[in-house]
Image: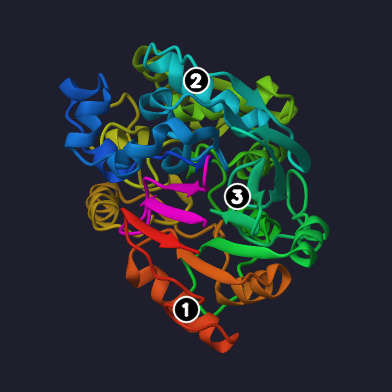
């Protein structure tokens, strides 16, 4: 029998964690943060421990798998977003099992470990996308595929593991972008090969399954950014762009347009430093070598004092697109930094607000404060990293699984995916399974 434990990420958007249990072996896929809980932590609680994080429900409740933790043979990370990798430093050492991820993801993990002064006892392996390898079980080896897929950070994966009953494919998160700005295209060829061999279960990102669209390519976001940055009339004014720090392809476009404007590109914020450094360390972002990065408070303040005197010479890229407390843009909105916004300045949001109540509220309050300074605000120079309903239809027809497990949110996110699977011939509770945190599906 195969058991799929939906530990986290099925009752909310975040703290993703799935465990596949077989007779003698088990495998973990992702251990992530619930980001609104992390963002709302008091400053005095910033020293993180498993107990503290569990008390605020910021990490998955893995108590449901404690009884068979001795069977865990490997821990796989699908990509470098914190809602998938963030809890690894705090949970993974409970399991005597190596950790596998792509070079970029593992570099981000090393940064998280350093931030929290944590040394893990488990071995860590960097595996390139589109690699097939084997992991040891108790009495057999298991074939694993790291299948390249496109998303809003680089080196993202669909992960397939072969079991005696067929492959299980873990697909959190993805879009289908055949013209990526950076990195490889989706590996449809390998997915089709695995499909022919037989897919028992497909754990599939359903965040935007209710959106009747195909998610546009990242090249569309690049064009949207170009329209704003290169054609606005007050190009001699201050320019601030905020985006996801982990979106290396987006940062590539911003840096390249900054050069076209003859502006020095400056990154402000610790998370931008974290992801940029990881990308440079694994050799996928040479365009970042010329970027000035300020991450510490005093560095940021010195840089902003310099920029304020000659704002037309700089392009600021900063954190804060979700209105996160303490982020650069949020502090600018509160006049807590030595840079005063004015009516000629341009603020470009190359991002969307992650759809949680906390984020929506934080963003609305920050935007209200920013508007008091009357800068020009440009929203939505962005495309999503998650597939829409028609992408999901396409991937389902490629993978052709026996069973579907919609993931990446509560029923409000996963029920539209269940409706789509009905159109494709699946039956709710029989071959399409709506799960919640702490659930077990026996196949």
**Would you place residue 100 above or below residue 301 in this image?**
below
Secondary element type, mark 1: loop
Residue 424 visible, this orientation: yes
- Circle number at residue 111: 2
Query: Real-space Cα distance between discs 3 and 1?
Result: 51 Å
Query: Would you say 235 lies left or right of 47 here?
Result: right
Residue 146 image offset from top left, x and y in percent: 70, 43
- The residue singled out by tag 1 in the image is 430
Task: Indicate which label's residue lies in the foreground, 3 or 2.
Answer: 2
Q: Residue at x 58, y 63 (%)?
A: 201
Residue 96 image offset from top left, x and y in percent: 47, 24
- The residue singled out by tag 3 in the image is 229
Residue 134 location, quadrant: top right
**Would you place residue 253 above or below residue 218 in this image?**
above
Q: Residue at x 17, y 29 (%)?
A: 42
The region drawn magenta spans 1-24
Secondary element type, mark 3: helix
Does label 1 or label 2 sit earlier along the sequence?
A: 2
Residue 370 image offset from top left, x and y in percent: 29, 47
Query: Would you say 196 lies left or right of 36 here?
Result: right
Q: Residue at x 72, y 45 (%)?
A: 145
Pick the front one: 230 or 237: 230
User: Does the segment drawn in magenta span residue 19?
Assistant: yes
Secondary element type, mark 2: helix
Query: Real-space Cα distance between discs 1 and 2?
Result: 42 Å
Does label 3 or label 1 sit earlier along the sequence?
A: 3
**Would you place residue 250 above or below residue 334 in this image?**
below
Pick the front one: 432 or 153: 432
Residue 324 visible, this orientation: no
Query: Real-space Cα distance between discs 3 and 2?
Result: 32 Å
Pick the front one: 195 or 283: 195
């Amino acid at each position: 029998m195969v058991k799929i434990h939906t530990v986290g990420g099925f009752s909310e958007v975040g703290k993703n964690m799935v465990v596949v249990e077989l007779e003698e072996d088990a495998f973990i896929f992702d251990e992530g943060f619930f980001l609104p809980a992390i963002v709302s932590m008091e400053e005095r609680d910033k020293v993180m421990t498993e107990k503290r994080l569990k008390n605020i429900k910021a990490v998955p409740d893995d108590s449901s798998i404690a009884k068979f933790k001795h069977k865990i043979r490997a821990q796989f990370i699908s990509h470098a977003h914190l809602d998938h990798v963030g809890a690894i430093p705090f949970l993974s050492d409970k399991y005597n099992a190596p950790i596998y991820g792509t070079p970029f993801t593992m570099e981000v993990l090393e940064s998280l470990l350093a931030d929290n002064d944590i040394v893990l006892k488990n071995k860590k392996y960097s595996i390139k996308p589109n690699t097939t390898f084997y992991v040891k079980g108790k009495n057999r080896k298991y074939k694993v595929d790291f299948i390249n897929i496109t998303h809003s950070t680089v080196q993202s994966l669909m992960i397939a593991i072969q079991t005696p009953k067929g492959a299980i494919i873990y697909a959190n998160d993805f879009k289908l972008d055949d013209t990526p700005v950076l990195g490889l295209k989706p590996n449809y060829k390998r997915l089709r090969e695995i499909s022919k061999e037989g897919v028992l279960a497909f754990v599939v990102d359903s965040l935007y399954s209710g959106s009747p669209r195909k998610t546009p390519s990242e090249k569309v976001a690049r064009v949207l950014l170009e329209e704003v940055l290169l054609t606005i009339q007050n190009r001699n004014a201050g320019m601030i762009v905020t985006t996801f720090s982990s979106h290396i392809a987006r940062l590539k476009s911003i840096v390249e347009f900054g050069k076209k404007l003859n502006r020095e590109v400056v990154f402000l914020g610790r998370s931008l430093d974290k992801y940029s450094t990881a990308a440079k360390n694994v050799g996928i972002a040479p365009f970042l070598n010329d970027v000035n990065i300020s991450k510490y408070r005093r560095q940021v303040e010195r840089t902003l004092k310099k920029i304020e005197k000659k704002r037309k010479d700089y392009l600021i890229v900063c954190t804060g697109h979700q209105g996160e407390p303490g982020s650069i843009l949020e502090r600018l909105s509160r006049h807590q930094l030595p840079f005063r916004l004015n009516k000629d300045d341009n603020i470009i949001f190359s991002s969307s607000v992650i759809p949680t109540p906390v984020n929506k509220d934080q963003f609305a309050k920050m935007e209200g404060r920013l508007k008091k300074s009357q800068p020009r605000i440009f929203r939505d120079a962005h495309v999503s990293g998650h597939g829409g309903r028609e992408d999901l239809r396409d991937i389902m027809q490629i993978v052709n699984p026996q069973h579907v497990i919609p993931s990446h949110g509560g029923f409000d996110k996963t029920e539209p995916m269940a409706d789509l699977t009905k159109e494709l011939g699946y039956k709710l509770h029989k071959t399409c399974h709506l799960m919640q945190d702490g659930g077990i599906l026996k196949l």
